[in-house]
Image (tube, rainbow, N blue to C red):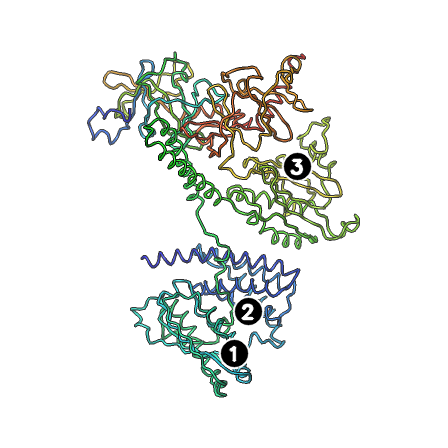
């Protein structure tokens, strides 16, 4: 549960011009996040619920003295929820929200691989989908005949918090 | 080079100490206006002297030179030669400012403001020049003074001491200053000192921070041994120090001798400082003795000023780090305690004993660590005498500043952030609040206005009040202004209190003329925002013609809270003990419903709205009916509510963790903390809960009525 599998693309020279992505599974789809944003991967543990928050905010945990919110990505994307199982993990990422860096955990079905992705191979997401969720997709890339969805986590998570920030701040 | 680095470190300490010294000088000078007591002048003088000595040591000749003039003036005041006039005090205050800038410029390695230095130097010289017309014993050069003392010494019953002083090489590094000791000695009686420079190494082998000189000193006069011990008792024990009494009547010869040999002594002293800074013993011998003489009658205290307060300088970051670690330690300790419940009973007793000791130690450690962060509010108040002094001159108003409760302690972070808002408030009170002497007299008041700054504890909070007995707020004008700026609807009726508090709105200023003191309308809203950011609250109350009172309420600390743990269903929340009035078991007949919805509880002769935490926070409780739970009565902002919880758990100090740092603020939640089992518990924001409960209650009733 501690770290992802070693990189499957062994071409180190190519790594120079490419970025590494940690991929994870969510309802049968494979998503990737910039590995430099990933702080750690930990098992699912009990959270403390927070009132007056959207349902995808599961609560907060104690991460070595810091209070870190945990978001459920399935709920965030409006996917069907499943019971957390043995492969369920929390990927702890650092995101930019406004000017501040925040540490946030996201619950995903399972971690998958670490891939080197060459920027030249990425395709922009098709804008025909029309759903809100696609704005969080940075790019699509095909690796080993699979489609990877590369996420813009600043938008995805930063906004998830910031969207709520304005009314929350007004109350405070 | 390490020596350079070390010097830079020491220089940094010097800069800090100089600033503190300047603060001391400033506050001394300001109180000097009222009473010219010699102890006060002495304090100011000592501060100036330390700055001079330090700057000379570090080779900041300009700072040293400038301070020298200041010091000379102070010395004359101290000796009663120079009367303490308002002009002199003003000049000295300006000199303090100038010195502060010089020190800042020196530290930043920027060029100095030569014009200002020269003009102030001229002012000081001017004052000194006047003084020199009068007989001035203090400015008599030291050799002559020594001569005089020797003569009187010889005339009375003579006896004396021969002192052999061979300091360790580290003397200067240990922050001792031989010149000061000699100055002290000279005050005891006629002194003849011979410096022994035989230990001086060749120039290339000379360490400028070491002391190579030793001295043999002849003292004439009736001097008790204790006095000598007192002067030398802070010298490191590694020094060789001998006192030999030279009993019997002193020969008449030393009198002229004293004059002759005092000069080599002066040269020796100067030689020491020159050797320190220029590393050139030959140059030292050539140095003019007069300079050393003027600095010599220092009468400096044996201890450095900085040592007196018994304080240490610690970076806040480091303290915060310790606080975090202690928090972790507490968590580990409770983890161990819960672990101990489930192991082999044979070892259990010893383990439990150890754990309870650990618990006590951690708690004590935490308490003392938290105490480090607490500082007296005088740190913020101390700048006001100067501000008020300067502003009242500028505005031609007469003001008496009264400070009270300076010893009230509050968290360093709170203290730092409250300083600027307080300055704004004080400036405003002086500029807008207090009237000119003529107007005051016309209004039948004493021509001197009073401005009071008071700090005190109330409940778990610190209250800071800024009171003036000035004109008060002009409610009509404020309301008119507010309507002009569309801050208030034309037909809106406001209470007096609401009108007063309009001044905290952004972009509001009623000053007819914008002065450079205040009046741009950026002050008060910033003040309020800063205070709110600290979890505090600011309010103004004012009576026209009688003055205004601004009341700031602040939390004691931002880092820790005495909490009551409560349980609702499976969730645990923390409520600040300070907000809890009492906790009661609810009797069914005391709970009534209002308009069929809002429940109220009769507590003695008062009806309290009942807030169900389970409903507020959407938690499944053990039971929804009031009599199965406990009612925690909370009070904030003068309002009370009963909060229904399932159970009361332990009371404990909790370390407040921000929810915002990784998430956002949540209504009704003040923050989070980490409990003994490592889980997160939310801290309930009592005032927020009460006000939102009040709104909801009203809403529910209104909705029902509609």
Please determine if labels 2 and 1 lie on a single subunit.
Answer: yes
Do callouts 3 and 1 mark residues in contact (Cβ within 8 Å)?
A: no
Q: Is residue B649 above or below residue B73?
A: above
* Mark 1 Cα shell of 10 Å, populated few (<14), some (14-19), many (≥20): some
Of label 3 and label 1, which has the lower sequence position? 1
The numbered mark, 2 or 1, whose residue comes first in the sequence reads 2
- Give whichever of A55, B304 is nearer the camera: B304
Q: Would you say the residues marked 3 and 2 are in contact, meaning their CB atoms lie under 8 Å apart?
A: no
Residue to which mark 2 is pinned: B72
- Chain designation of label 2: B
Give how far across and how far down residue B697 sits, in percent: 63, 19
Regarding residue B126, the answer to whether it shows in the image is no
Q: On the image, numbered disc 3 is attached to which residue?
A: B503
The residues tagged by marks 3 and 2 sit, at their Cα atoms, a distance apart of 49 Å
Q: Nearer the viewer, mark 3 or mark 1?
A: 1
As rendered, which of B617 and B292 lies closer to the eye? B617
> Same subunit under labels 3 and 1?
yes
As drawn, the label of residue B464 is none
Front in this rendered view, residue A98 or A138? A98
Which residue is painted at 70% across and 52% down in the image?
B397
The relative height of residue B269 versus residue B686 in the rendered view (above or below) is: below
Most extreme residue toward the bottom is B252
Q: Secondary structure at mark 2?
A: helix
């Amino acid at each position: 549960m501690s770290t992802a599998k070693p990189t499957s693309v062994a071409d180190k020279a190519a790594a120079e011009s490419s970025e590494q992505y940690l991929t994870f599974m969510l309802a049968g789809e494979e998503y990737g996040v910039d590995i430099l944003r990933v702080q750690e991967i930990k098992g699912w543990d009990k959270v403390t619920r927070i009132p007056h928050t959207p349902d995808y905010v599961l609560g907060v945990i104690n991460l070595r003295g810091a209070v870190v919110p945990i978001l459920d990505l399935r709920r965030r994307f409006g996917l069907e929820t499943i019971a957390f199982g043995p492969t369920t993990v929390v990927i702890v990422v650092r995101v930019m929200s406004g000017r501040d860096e925040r540490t946030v955990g996201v619950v995903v079905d399972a971690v998958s691989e670490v891939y080197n992705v060459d920027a030249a191979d990425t395709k922009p997401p098709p804008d025909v989908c029309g759903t809100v969720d696609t704005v969080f997709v940075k790019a699509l890339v095909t690796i080993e005949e699979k489609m990877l969805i590369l996420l813009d986590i600043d938008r995805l998570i930063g906004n998830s918090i910031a969207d709520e920030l304005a009314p929350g701040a007004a109350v405070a | 080079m390490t020596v350079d680095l070390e010097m830079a470190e020491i220089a940094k300490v010097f800069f800090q100490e100089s600033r503190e010294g300047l603060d001391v000088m400033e506050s001394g000078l300001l109180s000097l206006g009222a009473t010219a007591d010699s102890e006060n002048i002495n304090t100011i003088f000592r501060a100036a002297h330390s700055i001079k000595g330090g700057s000379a040591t570090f080779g900041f000749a300009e700072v040293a030179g400038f301070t020298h003039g200041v010091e000379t003036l102070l010395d004359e005041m101290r000796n009663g030669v120079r009367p303490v006039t308002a002009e002199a005090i003003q000049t000295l205050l300006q000199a303090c400012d100038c010195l502060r800038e010089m020190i800042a410029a020196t530290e930043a390695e920027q060029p100095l403001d030569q014009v200002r230095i020269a003009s102030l130097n001229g002012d000081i010289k001017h004052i000194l020049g006047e003084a020199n017309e009068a007989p001035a014993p203090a400015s008599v050069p030291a050799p002559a003074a020594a001569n005089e003392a020797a003569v009187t010494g010889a005339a009375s019953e003579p006896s004396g001491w021969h002192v052999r002083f061979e300091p360790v090489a580290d003397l200067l590094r240990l922050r001792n200053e031989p010149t000061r000791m000699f100055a002290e000695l000279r005050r005891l009686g006629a002194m003849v000192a011979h410096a022994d420079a035989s230990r001086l190494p060749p120039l290339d082998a000379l360490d400028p921070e070491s002391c190579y000189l030793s001295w043999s000193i002849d003292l004439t006069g009736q001097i008790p041994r204790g006095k000598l011990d007192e002067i030398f008792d802070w010298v490191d024990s590694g020094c060789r120090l001998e006192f030999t009494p030279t009993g019997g009547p002193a020969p008449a010869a030393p009198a002229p001798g004293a004059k002759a040999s005092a000069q080599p002594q002066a040269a020796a002293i100067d030689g020491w400082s020159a050797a320190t800074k220029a590393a050139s013993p030959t140059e030292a011998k050539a140095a003019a003795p007069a300079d050393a003489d003027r600095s010599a009658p220092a009468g400096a205290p044996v201890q450095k000023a900085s040592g007196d307060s018994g304080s240490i300088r610690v970076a806040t970051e480091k303290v915060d780090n310790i606080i975090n670690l202690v928090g972790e330690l507490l968590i580990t300790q409770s983890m161990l305690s819960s672990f101990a419940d489930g192991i082999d009973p044979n070892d259990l007793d010893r383990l439990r004993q150890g754990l309870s000791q650990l618990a006590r130690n951690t708690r004590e450690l935490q308490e003392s660590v938290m105490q480090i962060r607490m500082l007296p509010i005088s740190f913020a108040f101390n700048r006001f005498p100067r501000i008020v002094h300067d502003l009242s001159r500028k505005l031609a108003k007469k003001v008496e500043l009264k400070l009270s409760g300076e010893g009230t302690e509050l968290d360093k972070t709170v203290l730092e952030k409250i300083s600027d808002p307080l300055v704004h408030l004080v400036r405003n009170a002086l500029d807008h609040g207090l009237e000119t002497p003529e107007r005051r007299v016309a209004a039948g008041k004493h021509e001197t206005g009073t401005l009071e700054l008071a700090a005190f504890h109330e409940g778990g909070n610190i209250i800071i009040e800024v009171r003036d007995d000035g004109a008060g707020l002009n409610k009509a004008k404020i309301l008119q202004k507010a309507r002009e700026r569309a801050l208030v609807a034309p037909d809106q009726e406001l209470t007096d209190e609401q009108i007063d508090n309009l001044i905290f709105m952004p972009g509001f200023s009623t000053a007819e003329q914008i002065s450079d003191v205040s009046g741009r309308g950026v002050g008060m809203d910033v003040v309020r925002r800063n205070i709110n950011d600290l979890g505090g609250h600011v309010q103004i109350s004012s009576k026209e013609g009688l003055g205004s009172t601004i009341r700031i309420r602040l939390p004691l600390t931002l880092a820790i809270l005495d909490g009551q743990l409560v349980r609702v269903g499976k969730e645990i929340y923390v409520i600040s003990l300070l907000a809890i009035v009492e906790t009661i078991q609810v009797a069914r007949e005391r709970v009534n419903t209002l308009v069929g919805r809002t429940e109220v509880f009769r507590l003695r002769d008062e009806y309290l709205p009942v807030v169900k935490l389970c409903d507020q926070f959407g938690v499944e409780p053990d039971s929804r009916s009031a009599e199965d739970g406990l009612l925690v009565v909370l009070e904030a902002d003068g309002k009370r509510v009963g909060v229904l919880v399932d159970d009361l758990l332990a009371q404990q100090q909790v370390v407040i963790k921000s929810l915002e740092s990784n998430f956002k603020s949540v209504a009704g939640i003040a923050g989070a903390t980490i409990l003994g089992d490592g889980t997160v518990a939310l801290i309930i924001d009592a005032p927020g809960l009460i006000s939102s409960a009040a709104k909801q209650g009203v809403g529910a009733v209104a909705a029902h009525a509609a």
